[in-house]
Amino acid sequence: MPRLNKKTALITGGARGIGAAIANAFRDEGADVILTDIDAENGQAMADQIGATFARLDVASEADWNTIAERFPALDVLVNNAGITGFEGQFDDAPPAHDPENATLADWRSVHAVNTDGTFLGCRYAIRAMRANGAGSIVNISSRSGLVGIPMAAAYAASKAAIRNHTKSVALYCAAQGLNIRCNSIHPAAIMTPMWEPMLGNGPDRAERGAAMVADTPMRRFGEAKEVAALAVLLASDEAAYMTGSELTIDGGILAGSAATPGD
Ligand SMILES: NC(=O)c1ccc[n+]([C@@H]2O[C@H](COP(=O)([O-])OP(=O)(O)OC[C@H]3O[C@@H](n4cnc5c(N)ncnc54)[C@H](O)[C@@H]3O)[C@@H](O)[C@H]2O)c1
């Protein structure tokens, strides 16, 4: 029996990267997948490729979530995956400052609008859509950056920490309501997806840059999107029936230790 047999699952930011891998893995496990993204062209193409239903959804838009709620009033699984770092797009000069001293309020807010507001709106929709069955699973994609400070990506790190904590509020709220709606967070570190493209660049030093980015990772490699998808399948499935409010790291061992560990 497939592990997500006949479950209806909605995934945000599913056009590419980790979201696309999760959508694909969910389809393989028998779920009816609603693949959503702000990018309608690539989202539709990915949905067609894997046999999912596409719906355009900007997770920062309450109106978009209301439209989704009207179209899909019942749900078994929600994956709040869509997220931005604030470094997307092409920049004429240097990328925008995201450190605590120089970041603009507008840049801070634009990251939170997608990552924090988007996750709040997604959870709110999911609780309402899962209430009829009294059961469901919400999987929030946070980050290793939600567990440690990131000086040059302060808004991203704060937003991912907010996702971690909101996951626990949702889990406790649902349990207190007598609902079997579970909510857990996944905390990936460097996973090779298009999100890394602006940092890797297309120059001759691309491979060198990539290696440098994982030089301090104990397993010395990037993770793969399908490795994150495997965790999402577990949390979405009934195998994880006693897991709620938990946080799972998938980081090649980074958070197992500390850069300040005494030498051997
Ligand atoms: N790749 C990593 O190393 C890594 C590490 C930790 C956490 N994450 C998290 O995993 C999630 C997916 O990351 P990824 O690497 O696949 O990113 P990605 O940039 O490759 O893909 C993100 C997808 O989200 C969509 N999106 C962006 N803004 C949106 C919005 N407002 N509404 C709906 N969709 C929107 C994009 O169109 C894109 O399809 C993000 O939340 C990210 O923060 C990624």
Image: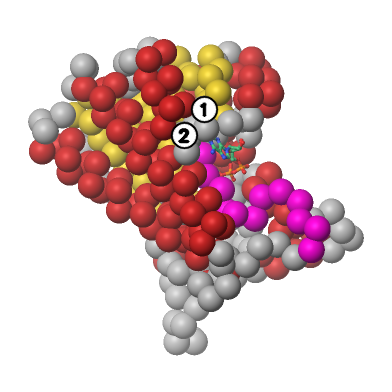
Amino acid at dot 2:
Ser
Task: Examine the rendered structure and indicate whether residue 228 appears above or below residue 31.
Answer: below
Q: Amino acid at mark 1?
A: Leu
In the drawing, does residue 259 fall left or right of residue 162? right
Ligand 1: does it lie within 8 Å of the C-beta at label 2? yes
Q: Is residue 70 visible?
A: yes
> Counting other residues with Cα less than 10 Å from the Cα at mark 1, is it few (<14), some (14-19), or many (20 or more)?
many
The residue sitting at 10% across, 31% down in the picture is 178
Q: Which is nearer the eye, 157 or 67?
A: 67
Q: Which-is-in-front pick, marks 2 and 1? A: 2
Instruction: Compare residues 241 and 149 and report the one nearer the observer.
Output: 149
The image shows residue 213 at horizontal and vertical percentages of 66, 64
- Asked whether mark 1 and ligand 1 are closer than 8 Å, the reply comes as yes
In the figure, residue 244 lies in which quadrant?
A: top left
Q: Are marks 2 and 1 in contact (CB under 8 Å)?
A: yes
Residue identified by numbered label 1: 57
Compared with residue 104, is residue 168 higher up or lower down, i.e. above or below? above
Instruction: Using a 10 Å C-alpha cutoff, classify the residue at mark 2 as few (fewer than 14 neighbours), some (14 to 19) or many (20 or more).
Output: some
**In terms of image quarters, where does ligand 1 lie?**
top right
How far from the left and from the top, in percent, is residue 154? Answer: 50, 65
Task: Determine if the magenta segment contains residue 92.
Answer: yes
Q: Is residue 122 left or right of residue 202?
A: left
Q: Give the residue at mark 2.
A: 61
Marks 2/1: CA distance? 8 Å
Q: For numbered disc 2, what is the local secondary structure?
A: loop
Name the side, left or right, on which 212 lies relative to 9.
right
Closer-to-camera residue (170/189): 170
Dividing the picture into quarters, in which one does residue 200 lie? bottom right
Q: Which residues are magenta?
A: 82-93
Query: Which residue shows up at 47% across the image and 38% down it?
Result: 60
